[in-house]
């Protein structure tokens, strides 16, 4: 095998490894997103507030959208879908931030808001770091 072939294989392996690390980083954030979504979905307030139900659904949709690629271990498809669905996730987080105080000032709702905003910022940062590469 020539040196150039070995270098190309190594470069491809490194890129694959870095994509895998990016997918793992996003997937770790989805664990937090899942907990926020579960809290919102099962809150008494969500039974009476259509916006809360929509937010919970949008968070679930983001998680569900990347799941097939994760299961298939297709990092490129995972990142493509994570990027494609990100604007809807951001809008859901913005809406929750906007309505949260009106829905409830309870600490649980405030902490869910902080957590959701943090997750969205983290995912955005991770996605932006892959665009620069």
Image (cartoon, grey):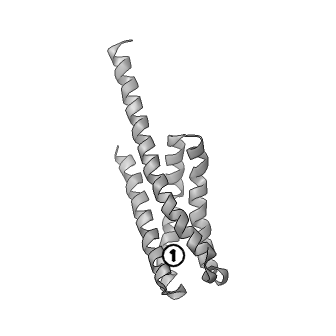
Q: Residue at x 51, y 59 (%)?
A: 31
* Residue 87 drawn at (x, y percent): 50, 62
Residue at the far top in the pictured view: 1
Side of 45 where 126 appears, left or right: left
What residue is disc 1 on? 95
Q: Nearer the viewer, residue 83 or 102?
A: 102
Quadrant where the N terminus lies? top left
Quarter where residue 44 is shown: bottom right
Q: Residue at x 41, y 30 (%)?
A: 12
Q: Can the viewer see residue 31 in this picture?
A: yes
* Residue 38 drawn at (x, y percent): 58, 69
* Residue 99 drawn at (x, y percent): 51, 82
Q: Can the viewer see residue 55 in this picture?
A: no
Q: Is residue 79 above or below residue 104?
A: above
* Residue 100 drawn at (x, y percent): 50, 82
Label 1 residue SS: helix
Quarter where residue 49 is shown: bottom right
Q: Is residue 9 above or below residue 129?
A: above
How many numbered marks, from 0 up?
1
Quarter where residue 43 is shown: bottom right
Q: Residue at x 54, y 50 (%)?
A: 81
Q: Is residue 7 above or below residue 115?
A: above
Crowdedness of circle 1 by 10 Å Cα count: few (<14), some, many (20+)?
some
Q: Nearer the viewer, residue 20 or 125?
A: 20
Q: Residue at x 42, y 47 (%)?
A: 22
């Amino acid at each position: 095998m020539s040196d150039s072939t070995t270098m190309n294989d190594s470069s491809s392996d490194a890129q694959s490894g870095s994509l895998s690390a990016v997918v793992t980083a996003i997937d770790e954030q989805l664990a937090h997103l899942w907990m926020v979504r579960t809290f919102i979905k099962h809150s008494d307030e969500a039974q009476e507030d259509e916006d809360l139900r929509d937010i919970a659904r949008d968070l679930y949709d983001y998680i569900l959208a990347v799941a097939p690629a994760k299961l298939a271990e297709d990092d490129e498809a995972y990142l493509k879908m994570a990027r494609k669905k990100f604007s809807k996730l951001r809008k859901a987080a913005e809406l929750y931030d906007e309505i949260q105080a009106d829905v409830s000032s309870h600490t649980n709702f405030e902490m869910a808001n902080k957590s959701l905003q943090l997750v969205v910022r983290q995912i955005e940062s991770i996605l932006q770091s892959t665009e620069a590469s």
